[in-house]
Each structure stands twice: as structure tokens, then as C-alpha cells.
Image (cartoon, rainbow, N blue to C red):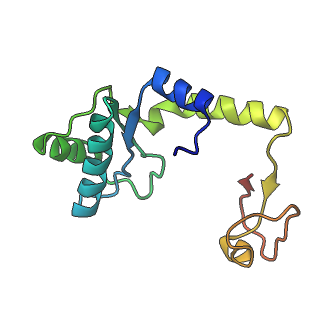
Amino acid sequence: MSMVPPIIANAIRALGVRGRFAPSPTGDLHFGSLIAALDSWLRARSQGGAWIVRMEDLDPLRTVPGAGQRMLAALTAFGLEPDETVVWQSDRLDRYESAFEALRARAAIYPCHCSRNDLSKFNGIHPSECVTLTKSDAPAWR
């Protein structure tokens, strides 16, 4: 028995299934990533859905030039071709900035200087009040 309410299940069916693979181009495609891509591709296909690739190229210090294109070529060589144009996160910075500003304007986010170490005491879940023990240079927005 499904735990998904019928109204949500109907909406999912109406929108269609979309499988996603979102690698970071920090090197060539490795076996573990190939298995993850194959899994998402098979799940989408088994449900009559589309398979999309979103390249997570937002960390310029870790991004290896040409790695994203080599990953896409490797996926194609294994028969895993996306059904839609590949989305490169770095091409969408304006959209993300707009969404961020809309959230900030509604006071739906706030700056936090808690480190991951600070939050480890709470199993990674941020408590209702900031428990900053160490001050980072740049805040995370929560």
C-alpha cells in the first residue's frame, strides 16, 4: 500500500517521471558514478519517464576543465543519453540569485555562521537558535 496521498500520486503521474543524474565535473566519470547514472536512467525508463543530466559545475576551484564534456561522452558511449538538453548549473546563476533574493526579501532565510562541526552535536540538523561556536568567514544561508 502506497503512503503517497492519491492527490499527490495523481499529480506525479500527470507531470511524468523524471530521472536525474547530477555529477560534479571534478574528474572523469568513475565506476560508482556510472552505476548511479545507470540506476537513475533505468528507473526513469522503467516508469516511462525522461532522464535528465544536470552538471554541478558551481565549484570553480574543483572543476576540472573538460571533465564535464568527457563525462557526457562516457555516458553516451554506454548508451546513456539524456532526453533533454544538459543543464549546466553555472549557466543558471541569474535564476539562483533571483530566487535567493526573493527568499531574503520575505525573511524566509537567515545567515548562519555555524560550522558543520558545530552542527554535528545535533546530527546535522540546525537547532532553532544559532549555536555558533566558531565564526566562519562567510555565512551559510538557512
Q: Give the residue furthest to the top.
A: 14
In this rendering, the answer to whether 113 lies above or below 90 is below
In this rendering, the answer to whether 32 lies above or below 109 is below
Q: On the picture, is 81 further left or further right than 109?
A: left
Depth check: give the residue in front, 57 or 51: 51
* Picture quadrant of residue 64: bottom left
- The mark total stands at 0
In this rendering, the answer to whether 142 lies above or below 8 is below
Q: Give the residue furthest to the front.
A: 1
* Picture quadrant of residue 140: bottom right
Depth check: give the residue in front, 1 or 107: 1
Residue at image location 19% in from the left, 44% down from the top: 75
Residue at image location 33% in from the left, 29% down from the top: 50
Residue 42 appears in the rendering: yes
* Picture quadrant of residue 3: top right
Residue at image location 77% in from the left, 75% down from the top: 134
Give x and y (percent) for residue 141. 73, 51
Q: On the picture, is 81 further left or further right than 108?
A: left
Give x and y (percent) for residue 54. 39, 39
Q: On the picture, is 14 further left or further right than 115?
A: left
Residue 28 appears in the rendering: no
Give x and y (percent) for residue 5. 62, 36
Give x and y (percent) for residue 21. 36, 44
Depth check: give the residue in front, 7 or 129: 7
